[in-house]
């Protein structure tokens, strides 16, 4: 049996995650891993670690032959990409938590792993403490993975829980998410869905072999959700969550998006509160499986980094089986979704764009409708997120292209039009 390697770590970043990792490593001596140096941006800050551990010179870590692992948990995606590229090219294994960097540079990151043959592990970059990447990599066969539905951003889930269950206003809930170390340093990334779509880009790669830029995936955040939406949800016995979803359609292509969605109270997603994340995987024979755990915060994120470090001791690498050993899936926007839209004035809503409208409520100050739209319409236009219009998908929103004609006819019959 191979003896476990000694890991000498160069750590980039000593913020919420970096400091968490430092503390966690001190408590796990059995791992045979130690941090030799930490590279930071601002040397003046008081830190809970000896001064001699820190440097501001990245090359001290990247060109130290004794350091065989670079752990990178910094905020700046461009700097992170440079560090990862140099580290891999210098023969060092890499553990990264930079979801934005990985999502935006996925083709290059894949190429670097191919060229160097070195491990690049990033379990903490999606759903923090939930081991979802390794599960998708190792457990699920391409053909069996029918659908995935997930809450992948802790801050927005925390804000929605605090607003709708504890009656906190949006700003106070966001402030709390920042204070607890859940939110990004630019919280717009959380609130407007960027962080979630970055994580979804990474998970789509491990689940289906899809290599797509996050800009090409339909997404928004929770910025337009109103209290009146929560009241409608309550009336109908539903919750509102920011849901990342992917589903294999009948033509074999994958529909994928990150949008607010109504979930039934029996849906596991409804059980996911505060900074927790959850993932439901639907596969051929197992049916549904639900993964649940903390999706943000210092120790939960550090725990995933630690697990990656531990996996390096036996030279674990992602094989990207869905990309290299199977026929990778393609993303498609050729499908329809059933949506709820609330808005201040009809003039903001292009009614002719709907395939059909099932319900409209025009009396209250805040109006709403339920109808069916082509996803391509949402991709090509932004009227649905302007003027505080709030779009929330219905509980079972995806309508396959092949079903639309039948459903359209049925809806017109019900409306008494034909
Ligand atoms: N801001 C992120 C979140 C941190 O709230 O989910 C964890 O990736």
Image (cartoon, rainbow, N blue to C red):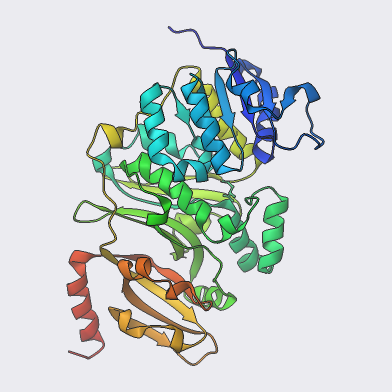
Residue at x-position 54% and y-position 52%: 153
Q: Is residue 191 visible?
A: yes
Instruction: Tell me if 299 is positioned left or right of 350 in this view.
Output: right
- The one of 267 and 72 positioned closer to us in this rendering: 72
Indicate whether 405 appears above or below 316: below
Instruction: Tell me if 328 is positioned left or right of 162 in this view.
Output: left
Indicate whether 393 appears above or below 57: below
Instruction: Tell me if 13 is positioned left or right of 325 in this view.
Output: right
Indicate whether 164 appears above or below 284: below
Task: State which quadrant residue 58 falls in.
Answer: top right
Image quadrant where one finds the C terminus? bottom left
Q: Is residue 135 visible?
A: no
* Rendering coords of residue 404 (x, y %): 21, 71
Task: State which quadrant residue 190 falls in.
Answer: bottom right
Instruction: Tell me if 352 is positioned left or right of 178 in this view.
Output: left
* Rendering coords of residue 310 (x, y %): 53, 22
Residue at x-position 18% and y-position 65%: 402
* Rendering coords of residue 122 (x, y %): 49, 35
- The one of 152 and 116 positioned closer to us in this rendering: 116
Residue at x-position 51% and y-position 11%: 4
Image quadrant where one finds the N terminus? top left
Residue at x-position 69% and y-position 66%: 171
How many numbered callouts? 0
């Amino acid at each position: 049996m191979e003896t476990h390697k000694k890991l000498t770590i160069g750590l980039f970043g000593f913020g919420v995650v970096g400091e968490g990792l430092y503390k966690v490593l001190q408590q796990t001596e059995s791992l045979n891993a130690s941090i030799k140096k930490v590279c930071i941006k601002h040397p003046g800050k008081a830190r809970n670690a000896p001064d001699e551990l820190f440097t501001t010179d990245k090359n001290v870590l990247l060109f130290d032959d004794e350091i065989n692992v670079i752990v990178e948990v910094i905020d700046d995606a461009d700097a992170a990409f440079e560090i990862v590229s140099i580290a891999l090219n210098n023969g060092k294994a890499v553990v990264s938590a930079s979801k934005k960097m990985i999502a935006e540079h996925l083709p290059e990151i894949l190429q670097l792993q191919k060229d160097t043959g070195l491990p690049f592990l990033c379990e903490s970059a999606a759903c923090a403490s939930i081991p979802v990447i390794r599960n998708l990599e190792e457990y699920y066969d391409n053909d069996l993975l029918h659908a995935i539905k997930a809450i992948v951003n802790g801050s927005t889930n925390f804000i929605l829980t605090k607003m709708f269950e504890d009656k906190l206003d949006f700003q106070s809930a966001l402030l709390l998410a920042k204070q607890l170390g859940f939110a990004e340093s630019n919280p717009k990334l959380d609130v407007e869905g960027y962080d979630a779509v970055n994580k979804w880009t990474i998970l789509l790669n491990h689940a289906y072999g899809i290599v797509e830029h996050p800009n090409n995936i339909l997404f928004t955040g929770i910025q337009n959700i109103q209290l009146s939406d929560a009241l409608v949800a309550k009336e109908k016995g539903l919750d509102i969550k920011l849901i990342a979803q992917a589903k294999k359609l009948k033509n074999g292509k994958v529909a994928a998006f990150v949008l607010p969605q109504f979930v039934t109270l029996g849906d596991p997603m409804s059980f996911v509160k505060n900074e927790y994340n959850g993932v439901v995987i639907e596969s051929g024979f197992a049916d549904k499986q639900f993964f649940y755990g903390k999706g943000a915060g210092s120790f939960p994120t550090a725990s995933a980094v630690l697990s990656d470090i531990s996996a390096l001791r036996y030279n674990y690498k992602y094989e990207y089986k869905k990309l290299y050993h199977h026929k990778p899936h393609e993303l498609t926007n050729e499908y329809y979704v059933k949506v709820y839209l609330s808005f201040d004035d009809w003039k903001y809503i292009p009614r002719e764009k709907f395939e059909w409208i099932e319900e409209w409520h025009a009396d209250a100050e805040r109006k709403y409708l339920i109808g069916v739209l082509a996803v391509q319409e949402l991709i090509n236009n932004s009227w649905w997120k302007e003027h505080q219009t709030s779009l929330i998908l219905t509980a079972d929103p995806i309508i396959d292209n092949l079903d639309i004609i039948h459903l359209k006819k049925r809806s017109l019959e019900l409306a008494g039009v034909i």
